[in-house]
Image (cartoon, rainbow, N blue to C red):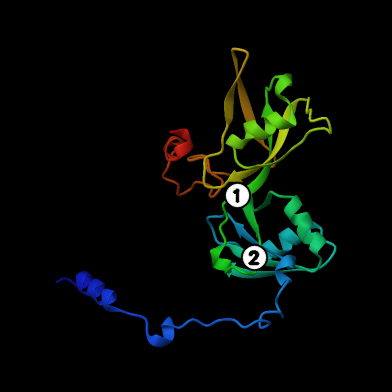
Amino acid sequence: MDATGDLTKRWEKLQLSTEESSCFHITQGVHQDSEGLGKQCLVAKAMAEKLVNSEAFHITMSQLWRLEGWVSFKELGDQSFLIEFQKVKDKEKVLAGRPWFFDRCLLAIQEVDESQSINALQFCYEPFWVQLHNLPLVTMTETFGEEFAASIGPVIRVDAGSDGRAWGRCLRVRVAVDLQKALMRGKWLGVDGKQHWISFKYERLQNFCFQCGTLSHKGRNCVRSRDEQQSDDPKLM
C-alpha cells in the first residue's frame, strides 16, 4: 500500500473523543453583552486578486463615505473587513450607496447576522442600478420593469412615478446582480410581432472580468470564456 492509501486508511479510523462529541450549550443571558452590536456592523470583501492594503482601505473608504460618526475596520483575512459604525444611520448610508469600489475592484458588502459565523457569510449578490435602453414607451412601467429585469437578478425596485410610469431615455431598475454569473449585456423583447434589442447599462460599473463577464474577479487568471460560463447556467439551457 502506498503512502497516500495508508494515510487515507488512518483518517477513516479516526473518531471523535467523548469530550469532542459533547455539545456545549449556551445558557440564557450569557451572550447578552454582545447582543445588538451587529446592528452597527458590516462585513465587506474586496473582489481583488492582489493583497489589499488595510491602512489604505481604511483611509480611502472613510473619505469616500463622508460619515458623521467614527468608523473602525478590523481585517478578517481573505480581503475581508469587519466594519463597525458609531451611528446606525452611517451604516445605512453605506448600504444605500452601493455599489462601492476600492482600487477599481468591487466591494461586496453583507450585513452582520449575530447568529452566524463570519466565515459562513456568502458574498453572492451586490445591488446595481441598471439602465434598460431602447424600450418601447408602452413597456416603460414599474410592472414591466419588475418582470423583465428579473432575468438579471432579484429586482429591488424600479425608478418610476407614483402612477407606475417611467417614460424617459431609459428605464432604471435596482437589481441584485449575481457576482458569479456573466453580466447580461442585453435581452431581446418581442412586442406586436417586432423584436427590439434591449441593451443593459450598469451604473457606476468599474472593473470586471472581460474573459468570463463576472464581477467576482478582474480576469488576470481567468481561464473561462463568457460562453463557457453561460453554458453552466441552467436558466440558459
**Residue placed under numbered mark 2 in the picture:** 113
Please tell me which residue is depicted at 83% across the width and 66% down the height of the picture: 69
Visible residue check, residue 206: no
Looking at the image, residue 194 lies above or below residue 114: above
Seen from this angle, which residue lies furthest bottom? 19
Tell me where residue 194 appears, x and y as whole percent. Answer: 60, 13
In this picture, residue 160 sits left or right of residue 214: right
* Residue at point 52%, 55% (across, down): 49
Q: Could you say which quadrant of the image residue 200 lies in?
A: top right
Q: Position of residue 212 (x, y in %)?
A: 48, 40
Residue in the picture at 41% in, 45% down: 223
**Quadrant (top left, top right, bottom left, bottom right) of the N terminus:** bottom left
Q: Total of numbered circles in the picture?
A: 2
Which tag, 2 or 1, sits closer to the chain's start?
2
Are there few (<14), some (14-19), or many (20+) residues within 10 Å of tag 2? some
The residue at 59%/29% (across/down) is 186
| 84 in relation to 22, above or below | above
Identity, as a three-letter code, of the amino acid under mark 1: Tyr
Label 2 element class: loop
- Amino acid type of disc 2? Asp
Cα gap from disc 2 to disc 1, whole angstroms: 16 Å
Residue to which mark 1 is pinned: 125
Of discs 2 and 1, which sits in the foreground? 2
Q: Nearer the viewer, residue 82 or 190?
A: 190
In the image, farthest residue toward the top: 193
